[in-house]
């Protein structure tokens, strides 16, 4: 089981790194698009029509991919004040419940993102000339990655590993 988990974690580590790289490139590309829009408006006297829609699309990608990577690396928003005061075993249960809730939310992102993509596909984004359903791909992709990352953490706990580093803290407090 540990071998399969190690292989799964290695794949997800690469996916997380790829997601961060794509998010970073998207952020830079969005900045360039907005700069081009400002340059066109104030220097050339003609605003490029596609830049706003492109910037919004790129922003969706880097937000959802960055959020997914943040969930995997535990940099995403969390409320863990209570966890500082409860025993180690209670922390395991609470963190597992949290991961299940995150997993369920991510399933919703994926399923409803897919429904929105299907419904929006016939409409076009006029300034980009692409199907409107493509706007919802970042939601589906981010949701799918968050599902995979949540499964990884739950699997690690089930295998007796400590993905959150709580065991080391508990042992340090006891000694």
Image (tube, helix red, strand yellow):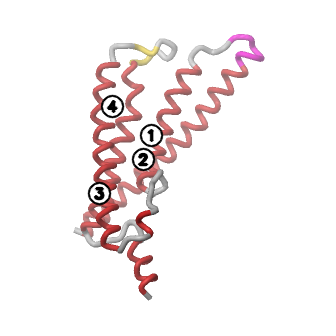
Left or right for 150, reference 126:
left
Magenta region includes residue 41: yes
Q: Which mark is residue 149?
A: none
Placement of the C terminus among the 4 image quadrants: bottom left
* Mark pair 3, 2: CA separation: 18 Å
Please report the bounds of the magenta region as a residue range.
40-46
**Within-10-Å neighbours for mark 3: few <14, some 14–19, many 20+:** few
Viewer-nearest of discs 3 and 4: 3
Instruction: Give the number of the disc on residue 97.
Output: 3
Task: From the image, tell me which residue sits under label 1.
Answer: 64
* Mark 2 → mark 4, Cα distance in angstroms: 15 Å
Which of disc 4 and disc 2 is earlier in sequence?
2
- Please say if the residues under marks 1 and 2 sit with CB atoms less than 8 Å apart: yes
Real-space CA distance between mark 1 and mark 4, rounded to the nearest whole angstrom: 12 Å
Horizontal and vertical percent position of residue 42: 76, 17
Residue that label 2 marks:
68
Give the secondary structure at mark 4: helix
C-alpha separation, residue under disc 1 versus residue under disc 2: 6 Å
Mark drawn on residue 113: 4
Residue 53 point in image, percent of width and height:
53, 21
Figure check: 40 above or below 147: above
């Amino acid at each position: 089981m540990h071998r399969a988990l190690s292989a799964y974690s290695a794949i997800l580590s690469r996916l997380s790194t790829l997601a961060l790289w794509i998010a970073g490139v998207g952020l830079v590309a969005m900045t360039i698009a907005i700069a081009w829009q400002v340059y066109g408006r104030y220097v050339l006297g003609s605003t490029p029509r596609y830049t706003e829609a492109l910037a919004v699309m790129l922003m969706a990608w880097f937000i959802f991919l960055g959020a997914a990577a943040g969930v995997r690396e535990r940099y995403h928003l969390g409320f863990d004040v209570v966890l500082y005061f409860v025993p180690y075993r209670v922390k395991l249960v609470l963190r597992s419940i949290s991961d299940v809730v995150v997993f369920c939310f991510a399933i919703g992102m994926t399923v409803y993102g897919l429904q929105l993509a299907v419904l929006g596909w016939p409409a076009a984004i006029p300034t980009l000339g692409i199907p409107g359903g493509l706007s919802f791909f970042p939601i589906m992709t981010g949701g799918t990655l968050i599902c995979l990352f949540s499964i990884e953490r739950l699997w690690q706990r089930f295998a007796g590993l400590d993905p959150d580093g709580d065991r080391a803290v508990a042992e340090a407090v006891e000694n």
